Image (cartoon, helix red, strand yellow):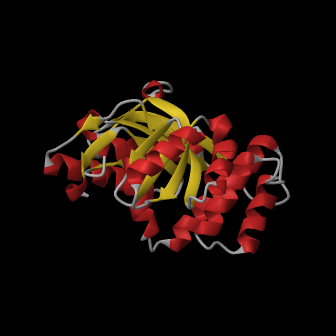
Amino acid sequence: MSGHSKWATIHRQKEATDAKKGLAWTKAANAIIVAVRQTGITDPEKNFRLRLAIEKAKALNMPKENIERAIARGSGETERGKIEEVVYEGFGPEGIAVICEAATDNTKRTAQEIKNIFEKGGGKLAGPGSVSFLFEKSALLILEKPQNLEEVILKLIDLGAKDIEEAQDAIEVYTEVGKLEELKSKISESGFKILSFEITMKPKSTIQVFDKEKVQRILNFMDKLEEHPDVQRVFANFDIPQEYV
């Protein structure tokens, strides 16, 4: 897999060099708000999704007071507009399947803007369930890439990893959502360096695209979605050559 790139890997590499810190902080705050609003639980030790959102915010060097303000807003302690979570599904250029998670205080406006991005990018927004069956909800741990790769892969399998993929910059380890904490502890105790972890939508199969112009069309479309201020995360099932990224 090291010679190929999926969107999850490309997004991570782009995120690491993203200078748009203000927008990144806004999205991180919205993720915290939604995590609190979903359960009403403001304690990250008792709210796994909130804990993930806070860790993400900290990784972006988001100030503590911003995090606390987002938690307060999510719990209804402030009077600002209600943030809702919305999931859009559709097909992008070259027929790729796309799931787009958003957090918005105006669902009608956001839906229309996302629809426009799909259509201008050569795709089409579809209804709920239209592409989600092509993905599997999974837990993902990103590990620092070691020198003795084969040995490490065997060790991770022994620890309970469900699937392991080699990326150019890291090792991507997948497991069932309910087993994330257990596997994370085992991996840490075994001395591996965990760079990040999250709940993701893993494609069950991928569409390979080798034409450079088609690849660029796809990446431009994905960038437009990612740049929308209401969009939290985007998942897609394409696989492209690393040199085209």
- Asked whether 237 or 65 is in front, the reply is 237
Q: Is residue 199 positioned above or below 25 on the image? A: above
The image quarter in which residue 210 lies: top left
Query: Whole-percent x and y of residue 241?
Result: 22, 50
At x 51%, y 56%, the residue is: 143
- Asked if residue 73 lies left or right of residue 27, the reply is right
Query: Whole-percent x and y of residue 151?
Result: 44, 49
At x 72%, y 54%, the residue is: 51
- Asked whether 166 or 91 is in front, the reply is 166
Q: Is residue 82 visible?
A: no
In the rendered picture of this protein, how many numbered marks are placed on residues? 0
Q: Is residue 98 positioned above or below 144 on the image? A: above
- Asked if residue 243 lies left or right of residue 5, the reply is left
Query: Whole-percent x and y of residue 168?
Result: 34, 58
At x 39%, y 63%, the residue is: 14
The image quarter in which residue 68 lies: bottom right
- Asked if residue 173 lies left or right of residue 3, the reply is right
- Asked whether 210 or 196 is in front, the reply is 196
- Asked whether 109 or 53 is in front, the reply is 53
Q: Is residue 94 positioned above or below 47 on the image? A: above
| Quadrant assignment for the C terminus | bottom left
Q: Is residue 186 visible?
A: yes
At x 46%, y 24%, the residue is: 133
Query: Whole-percent x and y of residue 155?
Result: 52, 45
